[in-house]
Amino acid sequence: MLIDTYGRVATDLRVSLTDRCNLRCTYCMPEEGLSWLAKPDLLTDDEIVRLIRIAVTLLGVTDVRFTGGEPLLRPGAVGIVARCAALSPRPRTSLTTNGIGLQRTATALRAAGLDRVNVSLDTLRPDVFKTLTRRDRLPDVLAGLAAARDAGLTPVKVNTVLMPGHNDDEAPDLLAWAVAEGYELRFIEQMPLDAQHGWQRDGMITAGDILASLRTRFTLTPETDDERGSAPAERWIVDGGPHRVGVIASVTRPFCGACDRTRLTADGQVRNCLFAREETDLRAALRSDASDEEIAALWRRAMWGKKAGSGLDDPAFLQPDRPMSAIGG
Ligand code: SAM
Ligand code: SF4
């Protein structure tokens, strides 16, 4: 098991397939992009699958989520999903994507064994989409979402970050749209993980703001803690149900005590937290012929040292060196 000194057990593995992206969301990346990882530094498809196999067969991981960067930019993404879904025991599989490549890949991903997708979409207004992502691709994302639903990658969840002065007035419209389309909407509080270090606590839209805005148009009833489990999203029943809306309040209502995550970057580093400032190099071990057991031991040690919380409330908080796109959000 991947247990830490606070008794938390990590069963949910986030795997970054690439640090590259075809959007430039303002809260994530600078306009000019970043200096991408060099090809030889990236794990190969075989290396990724081997690490997932070790996690699933030796370390108790039950859920694997592919992310990035934009995971669908990796040419071998569908093949990696297929090999992961063929493992025994079979992990639950999901993918977080900006949706642009989904229209092309949704059917193949489903056939490969992918269970679900989360698609990130912050606005339904083309001009705001262009400002927030610095690309004019809203129609591609909407088409990708529909393709995912039609392919059965359900429930399709939509991740939304609200940014002051851009889309912070759009929460009720987004929820009405998600209910009509059959998507489950989840708002994510903006976190200090952007490469430009532009996050400001005073300026961010909080879970409280989001709920107040939604309640101007909807009746929201909280789900019980039993229904939530270790999931980071607190969920509310919309207008008596069955539809739900979630809020991931990483900043104002952190859920670190129930965290069950372990993360693998595209260059083979284990991170025990989004906000960790240390990483453990599994790529070096892979490339020096370490055995599965040796790699598993390194991974266990990396998780054992996980801190109690993100440290966001500590005045000495320091952003991790890598931005969200390179960690794997
Ligand atoms: N490119 C894919 C996408 O956008 O879905 C996957 C990677 S992206 C880093 C994963 C998620 O992180 C997205 O839902 C995105 O909105 C979110 N994200 C990125 N930067 C963030 C930040 N600074 N605060 C909160 N969420 C952020
Ligand atoms: Fe790309 Fe996702 Fe970051 Fe947007 S949030 S720039 S889509 S990695």
Image (spheres, rainbow, N blue to C red):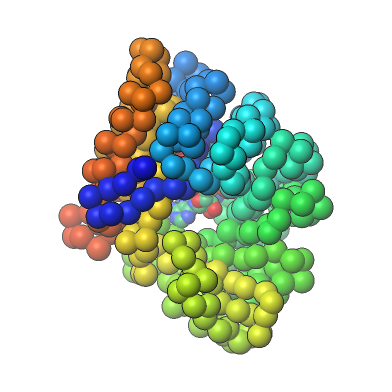
Q: Is residue 72 left or right of residue 203?
A: right
Work out whether residue 35 can be spotted: no
The single residue placed furthest to the top in the displayed view is 288
Relative height, residue 224 to residue 133 (above, below) = below
* Residue closest to the eye, 114 or 208: 114
Q: Residue at x 62, y 73 (%)?
A: 244
- In the image, is residue 140 above or below residue 40? below
Q: Position of residue 274 (x, y in %)?
A: 37, 48
**Residue 228, image x, y percentages:** 49, 68
Q: Quadrant of the N terminus?
A: top left
Horizontal side of residue 76 vs 148, given as left or right: left
Side of 250 relative to 220 (left or right)? left
The image shows a total of numbered marks equal to 0
Q: Quadrant of residue 296?
A: top left
What residue appears at the point 57 percent right and 83 percent down from the top-left corner? 220
Confirm whether residue 132 shows in the render.
yes
- Estimate the x, y position of residue 310 in percent, counting from the top left: 29, 55
Task: Looking at the picture, tell me which residue is in the foreground, 189 or 111.
Answer: 111
Percent across and percent down for residue 106 are 75, 43
- For image coordinates 44% across by 42% down, the residue present is 60
For this orientation, the residue located farthest to the left is: 316
Residue shown at 56% from the left, 23% from the top: 45
As drawn, 301 above or below 65 = above
Give left or right: position of 50 versus 308: right
